[in-house]
Each structure stands twice: as C-alpha cells, then as structure tokens.
Amino acid sequence: MAEFRITVIPGDGIGPEVTDSACEVLKLVAKTSGHTFTFNEVMAGGIAIDTCQQPLPEETLEAARQSDAVLLGAVGGPKWDGLPGNMRPEAALLGLRKGLGLYANLRLAILFPELKAASPLRPDLVEDGVDILIVRELTGGIYFGRRGLAESAETLEDGTPKGMEAFDIETYSEAEIERILRSGFISAMERRKKLTVVDKANILETSRLWRKVTERVKMDYPEVEVDFMYVDNASMQLLKRPTSFDVIVTSNMFGDILSDEAGMITGSIGMLPSASLGASGKPGMYEPVHGSAPDIAGQGIANPLATILSAAMMLRFSLGLSKEADRLERAVKQTLADGWRTVDLAQGDKKMVLGTEAITKKVMEAYLDE
Ligand code: IPM
Ligand code: MG
C-alpha cells in the first residue's frame, strides 16, 4: 500500500468549501483502497496576500514541489482587484504553474446527459453529447513573455500624443510546442483520435511555427486525424458543431479563452475539472475550472463536483490509482442520475437541491455503494 502526499491550496471565495469536500472524498478513497494520503494545507492567492503580503509564499511553492500532487480550490476576488499585476491573487496561479513546470493544462468540457437542458445551445446541437478535451499550453506564450509599460515619444497620424504605451510579447520555441503537441496527441490516442490544432497562422509567426512542428510530430501518431483551425473560426465552430470536436490543442491565451467557451456550452461550469501536468514523475496540480465565485462564498451552496472530479484526475494522473478514479467518476455520475443537484444545476424540483456538504455525502454514498 502506497503513501501519497497531497498539498491542498484552498485559496479564496468558494475554494475552501470545495477543497474540503474533495478532501473528504479522498479520505474515503484512502480508507477503502488501503492507501495513505497525507494532506498538507498551505496558502496562496488573496488569503496569502492578506496574511503574508504576497500571493505565493515560498513555503507554498516548496510544499507543492515536495508533494505527489496539488489540489487547488480557486484564487481571487474583488477585494484584491486593485493591486498591481504581480501582487494580485492570480500571480499565485502563474507562479505555481511556472514553478512546478506545469506546461500541459487538460480541461474537459463534458455535457453530462442528465444536465443537457442546462446547455445554452439548442438541444439539437448538443443531442449527441459534448465531450471536448482542451489541451492548453500553460507555461509559455504571451502569459510569460516580456512585457512593459512606458511613455511613448510618438504621436498618432493626427498628431495626438500616444501617451502611455504597453506591450506583451508572445514567444514559443519548437521544444515548447513539441511537448504540448505530444500531450495533445497522447490524449487523442486515448480518446477518439481526433486532434484540432487551434491557432492564428494567418497572422502570427508563433502559430506558423506551431503548424510546422505539428507536421513533424504527427508522423509519430499516424492514427490521429489532425486538422488546423484559426481561433476565430474555432470559437464559431464550437457553437455550431460542438459534438465534432475531440481534442483541441492550443496556446496559453487561446486555450484560456476557448476553455471558458467550451465550458459554457456544457451549461455547467460547476462540473468541469482540470489537470495541469509537467514532466512525468513531477507533481501535477488539479483544480476546478470555475473560479472563486465570491458572490456565493461561505453560504455552503457551492458545487463541489468539479473539485471532486479534479481529485479523480489526480488519482489517475499523479497517483496512478485509475481504478479508484473511474469509481469516483462513476459515483459523481450516479449522484446526478439519482437526481441530486446543487443550486447552480437546479431545474425545477427544489427537493433535490443540496448544499455543498450534503451533495458530497451523496457522492461518498454512491462510491461506497459500488
Ligand atoms: C484560468 C484563469 C487564469 C488564466 C487567471 C485567473 C490567471 O482564467 O485558469 O483560466 O488566465 O490562466
Ligand atoms: Mg481562464
């Protein structure tokens, strides 16, 4: 029986509530599987700014590095919105991603059959189910490029002084592109073997390099059908024919935007898990796709299912416990099939609407019932 160290970063808003739920579920998984999980809770985000004047204390990064996996709730909130970029809660996320070398962000957009009515798309468009995996590059591109802000000496055509001028540079190297493409191809091989590379190759040099590297890397995965799509078209096709996508691989910025769109198509962003992975053998980080939802924090009504499903991804990718991961995912599906909902998913029958703790208990019961 193995022993695993899990770093827990509850963060802000509903983060503590949903991570509590996932930890309860993980304790049950440990108990029933005979493995030992030790949890080490550390701070990041707004709470860390309030407590130790920095979004990502060195101890937090160090604890994360020393563990087998990291479970994160969410960071951020209006309270810290006025702070400069490197002092905002979001800087903690970027620091964790870079500090742990988490270059591959796997975001699922799944339309659970029971929740079809929640999709904002017309029923005929989602009838065949939506199951898209967005593989987003997470440690490069414009998020981590050089940036700057300075007074410009120039004027517009009509003589108006430009005033302050800012820039953010997008850079991608072949090696960075190749490793994220491989994550995409490997995921596609495990799924429906279809990979869409999303870029803006009609404009961006970085995108043209992505295409060139794809042409080379795809030789190693002859079974995978590859197509290229400009990001503007992709955002349209996601709405027009969402069922036709399998795996999308894309840059940091495009992945950020398209993963929100894909999540929304499922109508239940409160259900979507994510994994951020680096080199094999290094800790991965797992977090729900929804944010810190400060408007409902502390009320006990947050949907913990995305975090529980993120914990399932952790079991699979970082702890090598795929049987337990499958069982946990089935337990979540069973809970929905039994009709239980959190308030964000509710349609009609109020009797079936549960709070965070109560729906967590239902998932645990379903897990035990197997
Ligand atoms: C996300 C978020 C983050 C990002 C923010 C909070 C820094 O939007 O994880 O998608 O842009 O990556
Ligand atoms: Mg985002």
Image (cartoon, rainbow, N blue to C red):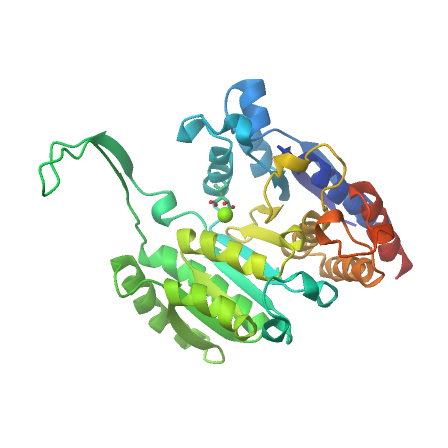
Query: Which residue in the rendered view is the most extreme toward the right?
Result: 369
Residue 65 vertical placement versus 321 (above, below): above
Whole-percent x, y for residue 359 in the image: 81, 48
Whole-percent x, y for residue 288 in the image: 62, 48
Q: Quadrant of residue 177?
A: bottom left
Pick whichever, 340 or 8, lies toward us.
340
Q: Residue at x 27, y 59 (%)?
A: 204
Whole-percent x, y for residue 181 in the image: 43, 63
Pick whichever, 200 or 221, lies toward us.
200
Pick whichever, 156 or 71, lies toward us.
156
Residue 258 vertical placement versus 19 (above, below): below
Residue 110 vertical placement versus 73 (above, below): below
Is 92 situated left or right of 144 in this image?
Answer: right
Query: Do we see residue 261 in this rendering?
Result: yes
Whole-percent x, y for residue 282 in the image: 55, 47
Query: Do we see residue 57 in this rendering?
Result: no
